[in-house]
Amino acid sequence: MAGIKAPVSEQFHSAGQRREGAYLGMWLFLSTEFMMFGGLLCIIWYYRLAHEMQVSKAVEHLHYGLGGFNSALLLTSSFIMSLAIQAARKAKMAHLRSLLLVSVGLACAFLALKGYEYHSEYQEGLLPVLTSQAPLKEPAARLFMGLYLISTALHAMHILVAILLGAGIWLRLRLGRLPMPERLTVIETFAFYWHAVDVIWIFLFPSLYLIGRPV
Amino acid sequence: MISETSHVASTEPSYLEVEHGLKSWLLTTDHKRIAILFMIAVTFFFFVGSLAAGAIRIELITPQGDFLTPDGYNRSFTLHGVIMVWFFLIPSIPSVLGNFLIPLMIGAKDMALPRMNLASWYLLAGGGLFTMTALIAGGVDTGWTFYTPLSTMFSHGHVVAVIAGVFITGFSSIFTGINIIVTVHTLRAPGMTWFRLPLFVWSLYATSVILVLATPVLAITLLLVVAERFFGIGVFDPRLGGDPLLFQHLFWFYSHPAVYIMLLPGMGVISELVTASAHKRIFGYSFVAFSSVAIAILGFMVWGHHMFVAGQSMYASMLFSLLSFLIAIPSAIKSYNWTATYFKSRLTINAPFLYTLTFITLFLLGGTSGLFVALLAADVHVHDTYFVVAHFHYIMVGAAVSAYFGGLHFWWPKITGKMYPELWGRVAAVTMFIGFNLTFFPQFILGYLGMPRRYHSYSPEYQFLNDVSSSGAAVLAVAYALPFFYLTWSLFKGPQAIANPWQAAGLEWSVPSPPPKHNFPNVPVVDFEAYDYPPEATRGRN
Amino acid sequence: MSVSRLFGVYLGALVLLGVAIALSLTGFAHRGPVIMACALGEAGLVLTYFVELKDNTSLVRLFALGAAFWILLLFAGPMIDQVTR
């Protein structure tokens, strides 16, 4: 918050204490994200149990190849981010900036592919509200597509937030406002968030695309 | 370590005097000022929620629906529930008393995340104003529980707007919870081990765990209602195979723990007030501490008891019923321990004590009535009747609100540096006890006799008890209004308070009233137990 | 954490992803649980090595475990109801 003059770090006695506070705080925040998506996953699995056959019909139409490639993109981006942390710890600023940029770039690619995927689903008439969902005869299959749309859209929003935060950090690095390793906590807590968004997709992808796919 | 009253000479200005002007309040990061900001906000919301309650009780004076239209009545009880739950009860003790006291109680200079603290306030104020505007502009008729398919398909109210406001405010809860947990882990003074913490801190820690883990589930549930209503993506739509009971599972997964968010902090306050009025250490410290944790954990396992008659499977219902009985145990342990603390104590009978007594009595009644509703067969009879309404008001209002008022009085000298008028304090406390029981005890009987809840008209045979209840509500209104007036009066005309007016134990009493901005000039070293009252303070013990 | 260790973890996660996708295309009777086990494995790798849970204090690990437990609770309730109706 701009304009607040009161010193923020006075309550901490040491940098170590402050760092632990940041880690704990970030983990607690990430728990809220996991609980939120956990609720979504709960709903997905509940309906899978309740309408197994009908949901299969919807899963059949989902593009597992595209989704799988996107999963790989996200894993790669997570890997690159972990390299960025190593660079930050060694104060290798140029490496840090480029790795961060690559990571963000891969996430952008994820979003682009997701957009393309939505577009194809729109054209195939699978999406609720926007299309008639004609290829899906079973009501629960249509419901599942709605769930798919909501889950992946919410996840995509989190990716967007991560991209924006990452771009912001890159800019601050570029402007020399984040000296390393003094401000390491900023990179580390940001990376936690990045990995958390990846972990959420790791569970979302099979729950939506892979399980119950008719052969 | 009971602080002597005089040696704390204040050379530093208090946190109230150190800066002036609106900006110094609206951009503050001082946990004490933020607590006051929260106090103003929750007082305002309490007032609005009470107006809605007033409308309900006026309507129910006569059996016919003659004061409000049926739809207007639905909107009134919805407004009452939404405002009271999310904008008063949940933030009241954690964000007002918790924010003010936790750093003081653990020997810290501030909360761990001061800017997050301020953000939490803005989210509450903003979300609350947004929701209230939507509620007053027409509101919503679904009840605070937003059950589908009424909320998603059939309601004509401003469902999306109200939900958006609640969603925003959820982040306020989460931020407060995160702040409390991180603060308690990282900022305890040297020597302040977990088992030397005041029990208030234990309670708020347990509450914060619930805040952090439960609120996101509400967030996704409400998002899905909005998705269905606003975007037409039907996740709970029965025509698509959606299950309305699934909504209830997700809603109550949050909302049952939410009632413990509303209750646990009150229990924490009572632990402090009991020891202070008894001048004696608490009976069974670790049992009370672990009970707070047990309530927080068990509270996540009982939500199905709201759905016994909604179509939930019999086996799941039996499991939830059993767990609901189990959760009575830690609550009972606390109640017994508080009572045992009073045994052979040197009692101080003042306003905080009277609020404490109110809490213990009304919690006992409310909690016992909880056993009735936890019992499957009995719940079939009383579900959706006034019996349930009475049950939760005994806990939420009789207990939790009394604890808030008791805590407000007890720590008023520390927060403001002024003493409130003791006589009026006692008058208000006694009036509250009388008014509360007059209002809500008849509702147990009404419910048992079969009067349904959320109905704006009723069968004539229920009229007498309804009239008793409505008269009680008028008395209760007076009891709540009184403190507003005399506490405000005390700010201008009240006598100056000393550092430790109650001769109570606790680090917060070792600093001046009101404290300086950074609380402690030097980091205190803690080598004493919590509540280490001198043995000679108790009567009959050596 | 060495770069080669991180790269190994990354490859491991990719392999698990590949196995999961491949399995979903077969008719293997128990492919459901195995696919989710792969997902669990991937998440475990990311959390242990990328997020460096194994290096954190035991408190942070307790928080992580707590979050996992609570998610399980959230799943258990509605499922038990659904299955026993």
Image (spheres, coloured by chain):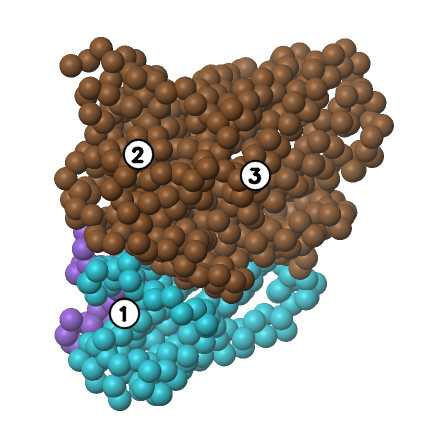
Query: Is the residue marked by circle 3 packed among few (<14), some (14-19), or many (20+) residues within 10 Å?
Result: few
> What percent of the width, then of the height, locates residue B538?
24, 17
Let me know if marks 3 and 2 both belong to one chain. yes
> What percent of the width, then of the height, locates residue A24?
29, 56
Whether pointer 3 and pointer 2 mark residues with C-beta atoms closer than 8 Å, the reply is no
* Residue depicted at x 35% and y 53%: B516
* Residue depicted at x 54% and y 52%: B124
* Residue toward you, B537 or A33: B537
Let me know if marks 3 and 1 both belong to one chain. no
How far separated are the C-alphas under marks 1 and 2? 32 Å
Identify which amino acid the numbered label 2 is placed on. Leu
The label on residue B189 is none
Q: Secondary structure at mark 3?
A: helix
Can residue B295 be seen here? The reply is no
Q: Chain of mark 2?
A: B
Judge whether A104 appears above or below B444 on screen.
Answer: below
Whether pointer 1 and pointer 2 mark residues with C-beta atoms closer than 8 Å, the reply is no
Identify which amino acid the numbered label 3 is placed on. Trp
> What percent of the width, then of the height, locates residue B94?
43, 43
Pointer 3: what residue? B489
Mark 3 vs mark 1: give the one in front.
Answer: 3
Pointer 1: what residue? A185
Q: Which chain is cyan?
A: A
* Residue depicted at x 66% and y 41%: B48
Q: Colour of chain C?
A: purple
Q: Secondary structure at mark 1?
A: helix
Q: Which chain is brown?
A: B
